[in-house]
Amino acid sequence: MSDCIFCKIIAGDIPSDTLWEDENVIVFRDIDPKAPTHVLIVPKEHIVTFADFKEGQGDILLSMSKAARAVAEAEGVLDSGYRLIVNNGPDGGQEVLHLHMHLFGGRPIGPMIKRAE
Ligand code: AMP
């Protein structure tokens, strides 16, 4: 999609600190990291949310899993642990409307979500 920032990164039109890629997925460092390791695992195809996978796209999910493991290993967090988060839609806090999985590690990531007051 022409106005999608992640599509521009995938096309090489915007620079990124890319750590890993295969034919389906690219992994680059988040520009505003919230943990010592904070990377984004992004399908190269413009899929908007996790709910938008279609039949025949299972290989993209498998690549996302492979990417998470490879990058966690390369970043030295495979054994210490890490968190994977996919934000979906407005209440999920999704700001970029191109599916991406955050991987956070390198310190204890803390409670899963903050309880509402
Ligand atoms: P989300 O709120 O789940 O949509 O997360 C979007 C993430 O994309 C945020 O953590 C941003 O810091 C990150 N981000 C936005 N623009 C860029 C960029 N050009 N390169 C790397 N990360 C980016």
Image: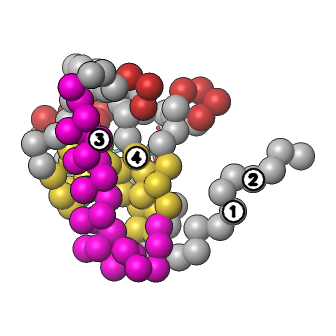
- Report crowding for label 4: few under 14, some 14 to 19, many 20 or more residues within 10 A (C-alpha): some
Rendered residue at 38%/22% (across/down):
52
* Label pair 3/4, CB-CB below 8 angstroms: no
Is 37 situated above or below 30?
Answer: below
Q: Nearer the viewer, mark 3 or mark 4?
A: 3
Q: Which region shows up in magenta?
A: 56-82
Rendered residue at 25%/56% (across/down):
67
Label 1 sits on residue: 111
Pick the front one: 25 or 61: 61
Is 67 situated above or below 36?
Answer: above
Label 4 sits on residue: 101
Q: Position of residue 86 (x, y in %)?
A: 48, 42
Rendered residue at 21%/61% (across/down):
19
Mark number, residue 61: 3
Determine the CA span between mark 2 and mark 1. 7 Å
Q: Amino acid at mark 2?
A: Lys
Instruction: Name the N-terminal-most of marks 2 and 3.
Output: 3
Q: Amino acid at mark 1?
A: Pro
Q: Is residue 107 left or right of residue 3?
A: right
- Report crowding for label 2: few under 14, some 14 to 19, many 20 or more residues within 10 A (C-alpha): few
Instruction: Name the N-terminal-most of marks 4 and 1.
Output: 4
Residue at the right extreme, as displayed: 117
Mark number, residue 114: 2
Q: Quadrant of ligand 1?
A: top left
Dominant secondary structure of the residues highlighted in magenta in the image:
helix
Determine the CA span between mark 3 and mark 4. 11 Å
Determine the CA span between mark 2 and mark 3. 28 Å
